[in-house]
Image: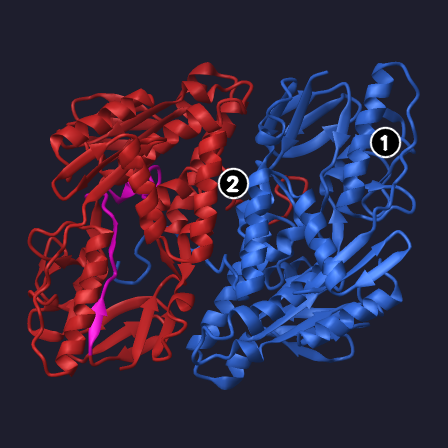
Chain colours: A blue, B red
Amino acid sequence: VRVTLVDRENHHLFQPLLYQVATAGLSATDIASPIRSIVRDQANTTVLMAEVERVDLEGRRVILDSGELSYDYLVLAPGSLPNYFGHEEWRRDAPGLKSLGDALEVRRRLLLAFEAAEREPNAARRAELLSFAVIGGGPTGVELAGAIAELAKRALRRDFRVADPGSARIHLVEAGTRLLSMFDDGLAEHARRELAELGVDVITGARVVAIDDHGVALEGGRMIEAATTVWTAGVRPSPLAASLGVPLVQGRVAVEQDLSIPGHPEAFVVGDLALTSGVPQLGAVAVQEGQAAAAAIIATLASEPRQPFRYRDRGVMATVGRSRAVAKIGQTRFHGLLAWLAWLFIHLVLLMGFRNRVVVFFTWVWSYVTFGRGARVITGIAPSQPRSAHA
Amino acid sequence: VRVTLVDRENHHLFQPLLYQVATAGLSATDIASPIRSIVRDQANTTVLMAEVERVDLEGRRVILDSGELSYDYLVLAPGSLPNYFGHEEWRRDAPGLKSLGDALEVRRRLLLAFEAAEREPNAARRAELLSFAVIGGGPTGVELAGAIAELAKRALRRDFRVADPGSARIHLVEAGTRLLSMFDDGLAEHARRELAELGVDVITGARVVAIDDHGVALEGGRMIEAATTVWTAGVRPSPLAASLGVPLVQGRVAVEQDLSIPGHPEAFVVGDLALTSGVPQLGAVAVQEGQAAAAAIIATLASEPRQPFRYRDRGVMATVGRSRAVAKIGQTRFHGLLAWLAWLFIHLVLLMGFRNRVVVFFTWVWSYVTFGRGARVITGIAPSQPRSAHA
């Protein structure tokens, strides 16, 4: 077989650690690996950095921004985007956290908020600048809120003279009745308690009705003050699905048991875009589905029957902060230091590339000992050129 | 004393390693340290992230974009910007290399050129995409040209199927008669030979008359094909100097022997903006001048006489590539492996922060063994949002 791998980015991204890039714990390059390096030794694999504009299922063609590809077999894994539930205008004041670009933008906003607070003579506005809101109490929201609290109250605490990062307020807003809906009640309650110990204000059962750069308005009239807001309240499927011309369920493709598109045994959908009963939207699922789609293609080429996809639940975990995490592996539930160490270990193993593993491991040890955050660098400002009016 | 440190960025940048960020060898955060962390333990020091718009020497005020500061003593160290010698329009197709933003932009352009070459069906255009020009044969230009050659011919060589990074052409263009004018003839000739061994085409005595995204035109009519060009041909002083209202020499302040501005013993200029006879524009000079200005202020506060500034030449070095460097320390000149090891060691020592030193050291060892470049990640693309027309 000849394989062409198309991606709009040049790197594979380890999304579970994005929140650490957003909170200056890790560098962007630590959690990304060049796709070309990953498949370097597969001589039959070509990598194309390109944007897929649409898929022509009948013509078996993929239309790119820079040409088109025809195929015998197709595996679609475009993932999902932040879902603002019809309020795209919230994106401006509440960016999502799905790509490296997102993480660097969130990092920039977080760090600039503290800098602005240090310059701010008005105490009320300073308090607003030191208030942060995270919308969405899933694993990403929980991890991000905890990490912002540790950034403010530990890493930055002694670095300011006027502003007091220790007084920062972090609000975690969840529309459902509790955090971490994919965990059970006991673990969710643990996460809530550990967040509270870090100083995070957890607000559940609260629906957002408006967001701007002063804060978040909740249904019922409550206002949450926050100059910086991050959106982790849900995802929507890639708009690529719409180009397929097949029926969608909430934007997702209800695939066959072998993950193929109904009526198109040569075209597979894996990851967040694939709707399969009882399977959550997790990276681990996407990996297993990718392997299953490859196995199905190989079986078909060998004229053997395809096996139906079966998800093996390896568990779920979320870290709340230093020595704090919750985990559910099989029927076992645990929390605290043990869960945190398990989280560290598993994420190091899943991270791709020897260099990244060593650097991330060392950075974690260093951060644990010093409470420091090694990537407190604001980039994304214009390249070196005069910015003042005198230039 | 109370000290206020004002900078437009939130980080101190170790400029000598910028070219390694630009060529994906190091991460941006590896060579930057948060200014606040550096002076954390100086209780009398406040850090302000702000842009200085002008200095009112008579009124002893610094006017910021976000307010103003009055002072008893002033130390100005705004550094310099890329100098396009009146051709600012070249900036678009030939960015400079003075800030982290610059380095990330150059990295993005270099990596995207290889990606575009892989997609390019036309062989002539592919060759153009795989051609690179570096303008300016000082240490930065020499180091950058060598690093681009190693990136193409070593790190990327096996990662492409259509394009052949090994066939990349790298042109280093210098207006003077030889490279590295601050070194002597012998070392400059060594650098040229080592660059030639890496496949870099060194062109001296060549003045640039035009630049676009197809290449560089030289005086006399010669055209150099290159889709990507980087400008390292010189610097100009910060435009802040113009706001001082004192006579300037080529945009720089001809300071007194104690580094103060003539007629203003309370105001010092250090670094690239200070013109002192026989002293080159080097980071090492700026550091020594900063220490001298501080000593002068302390002496004055203690009613003691100021000592005139004396530059202690600790030598100059430039690395050409793997195991290749040239160095001049005192009357000693050396090159090759020994100079390269000395370069590595000295730059590790000068780099700020324990975490950065360890990560950079490990990354260098890893790169030496694997020929890999760990930061081959294109960022700076828009955050996660639909980019296709279907969005």
Q: Quadrant of residue A54?
A: top right
The quadrant the C terminus of chain A occupies is bottom left
Residue B378 circle label = 2
Instruction: Give the left or right position of residue B176, taking residue A101 as reference.
Output: left
Q: Position of residue B359 (x, y in %)?
A: 47, 48
The label number, if any, that marks residue B243 in the structure image: none
Camera-side residue: B162 or B297? Answer: B297
Q: Chain of mark 2?
A: B
Q: Is residue A389 above or below residue B208?
A: below
* As drawn, B100 above or below B207: below
Say which element carries label 2: loop
Residue A121's image quarter?
A: bottom left
Do the residues bearing badges 2 and 1 touch, measured as CB atoms within 8 Å?
no
Residue at 20% x, 21% y is B221
Give me the disc on residue A261: 1
Cα separation between marks 2 and 1: 32 Å
Quadrant for the N terminus of chain A in the image: top right
